[in-house]
Amino acid sequence: MIEVRHVSLSYGKTPALKDVSLCVRPGEFVAIMGPGASGKSTLARVMDGLYLPDAGDCLVDGVSTRADPMRARRLVGLVLQEPDDQAVARRVADDLAFGPRNIGAADIPERVAEALLQTGIAHLADRDIGSLSGGQKQLVAIAGVLAMRPAYLVMDEPTSLLDSDGKRAVMDAVATQKHAGRGVAVITQDPSVAARADRVVVMSRGSVVAQGPPAEAFAKVPPGLIGLPEMTRLSNGLRDRGIAVKRLWLTVDDAAEELCR
Amino acid sequence: MKTPAIAKLAWLALFSIAVLMAEGHFLAALAAVLIIAAFMLGAKPGKLLRMLLPALPFIVVISAFQWLFAGPAMAALTLVRITLLYVAGSVVTATTTETEFIDTVERLLRPVSTLTRTDIGRDIATMMMLAIAFLPIIKEEHDSIRLAQEARGVSYAGFRGLIKGEIAVIVPLIYGLSARTDRVATAMEARCYGIKK
Amino acid sequence: MSLKAEDVSYRYPGAGGPAISSASLEIGKGELVVVCGKNGSGKSTLIRCLAGLIKPSQGRVSIDGQAPEKARRAIGFAVQFPERALFERTVCDEVAFGPRNMGLPPDEVDRLTGQAIDAVGISRDLMSVAPRSLSYGRKRLVAIACAIAHRPGYLFLDEPAAGLDYEGRTRITGLIKSLKAAGMTVIVASHDPLDLLDICDRLVVLDGGRVVADGPPSVESLGRAGITSDTIELARRLQSCGINVREAFSPEALADSIVEALK
């Protein structure tokens, strides 16, 4: 489990995180939402051991990132927003070998093959990364961290620059990793991504302002802070127009079930 | 069977020396050696041709200068030599993956690393890999910033326009590349770059 | 007065196939047109051709009857990544850059700069701030202010909402609405146009460099761009279970339609 306990962190005098607590369990998909500059990206880097908290602590499987940041980086794979900025080599397979080489792995070819299979891009192994689509590049970035066999994945806005096809491919990869027992945390501005999570954490100005299963978190969040899933907007809209809606909707099924009766 | 990268690099070095020393019939023999080598290493003719095409104008211009200053015989010799060297280099790069290449560089530099008790060999190898990956990106970034400035009415016509226009490109380019370097460095650190084995 | 593209094709140097093939399009004054399609479908290339930033390999573009190079003042263009355009020391200089390039007198430049900054809703207090120190959303607004400062008749926006947070997206949608209301012709390229469907006049869908749909937005044309949404999906489900709702793109529009159908 990744446990963030009462973490505070400042850049110089600007506070980025203020007493933030949350956890990501194995096999769980947690979505982290919030406006720009609310501390989401900083939080991702704390979970990965890239930044150490000023106060509080972050534990990865029971060990503080402060005690062993390198262990945290091995156990927590971090995927960033821009598909172009994560490749260190030109050929896909060479890029995937980068992480395992850094940790001195003996079975690099096996790890590369395994990561290619898990992300469904084995056919791209010999391609030049520059020639791939944005979605494919993002899958390469995910495969690049999977080659290090992490126990958790933390993704910082992995779909925001992708089109519908790319988004679908990345979300499929998230589902696969969750089912393989990895804990996945996805930072996102996209409510349709968050609607599929087990838990949603909403941040604002460095603090957690709502946390819980999606329906609960979306109901608690201050209006106008984040975008809401379309079906949630619909159930709110119907309520505003005087139609009784039993509960807050997340999916088309929720809405169809109640309306078609 | 896969030829080790170090053998290919050694062959390339010897072949280059031979090309620079040889003349006349010997060059024809070396061309034959090159074709056999390309065949043995499994380089695809189509790929070699695609690698050669962008370089051809430069080769022709250099040879044309030779013609002006040293006469047609020297020009022909230069043309053949440069083409042979270029294709030989392409055969090696087309059949060697970056990982193999980097491993070889790292191994060759291992004595230096041991002597200085650092990871310098590995760092140099990684930097070479990054440079290969980044060169096309700089050009791409430059062109898209130039387009962005043209969209705001910057004219690149004439010498003064070009200089003024390039200034409007260089500032965002430097900022853009340094921001990008930060992001790439973060991605590399997150993938455990810098961990001692 | 209109912007016309006839049989336009464009091939990037060294590329295998054309990025745009024989696209024909006419955009009238005051229209809000959204060009959508998947990444790599040719959206950016098409609007660059229409704006005269790149010359089509085939076919021709005319802006109010003139060749694009003669109609530079009629065109404003904001590229996708604002940091690629911003380079001046202050927001004020940045926005004034375009009008100065056009050789306008200083007091006219100041007036246009102020108007553009007001139009995008940036506080005038920020005029002396360095554009690079602003948040991503504000940079995008400054870049749009730069594009409209010389009061072009046609404004092109390339992915204006990409990478922005909820507040930023809402502001961009509101800004596009107010620019349209002020009579500007706005052409937006976007891979995710759902926010704009309720206010746009026309949706142009590109697939593999070809125009495959052009007309008022419809579920069918969106489908051709590979775009679907929960709202569209639910409307279909409701119709099949006997609730007669209209085609709707935003949940709010669907809510209205449901209220009507249930009456």
Image (cartoon, coloured by chain):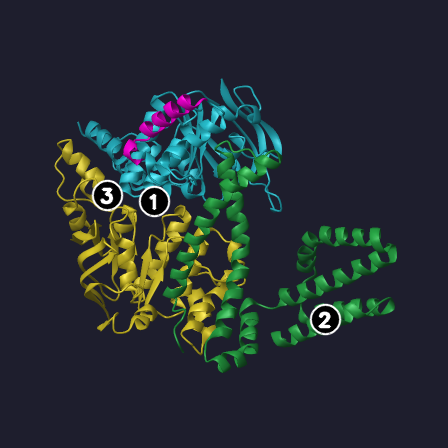
Chain colours: A yellow, B green, C cyan
Badge 2 marks a residue whose secondary structure is helix
Q: Position of residue C231 (x, y in %)?
A: 29, 38
Q: Which residues are magenta?
A: C105-126
Depicted C45 relative to depicted C70: above or below? below
Do the residues marked 1 and 2 share a common chain?
A: no
Q: Of the residues shown, which amino acid type is indicated by label 3?
A: Leu
Q: Nearer the viewer, residue A70 or C150?
A: C150
Depicted A60 relative to depicted C39: above or below? below
User: Main SS of the magenta segment?
Assistant: helix
Q: Nearer the viewer, residue B69 or A158?
A: B69
Please state, as top left, top right, bottom left or bottom right, where the C terminus of chain A lies in the image: top left
Which residue in the structure is indicated by mark 3? Answer: A228
The image quadrant that residue A49 belongs to is bottom left
Name the chain letter of the residue that bears numbered label 3. A
Name the chain letter of the residue that bears numbered label 1. C
Q: Within 10 Å of the Cα at label 3, are there few (<14), some (14-19), or many (20+) other Cα atoms?
A: many
Residue B37's label in the rendered image is 2
Q: Nearer the viewer, residue B127 or C125?
A: C125
- For the image shown, how many numbered marks are present on the structure? 3
Badge 1 marks a residue whose secondary structure is helix
Residue at far front of view: C106
Please state, as top left, top right, bottom left or bottom right, where the N terminus of chain A lies in the image: bottom left
Q: Is B50 situated left or right of C195 in this image?
A: right
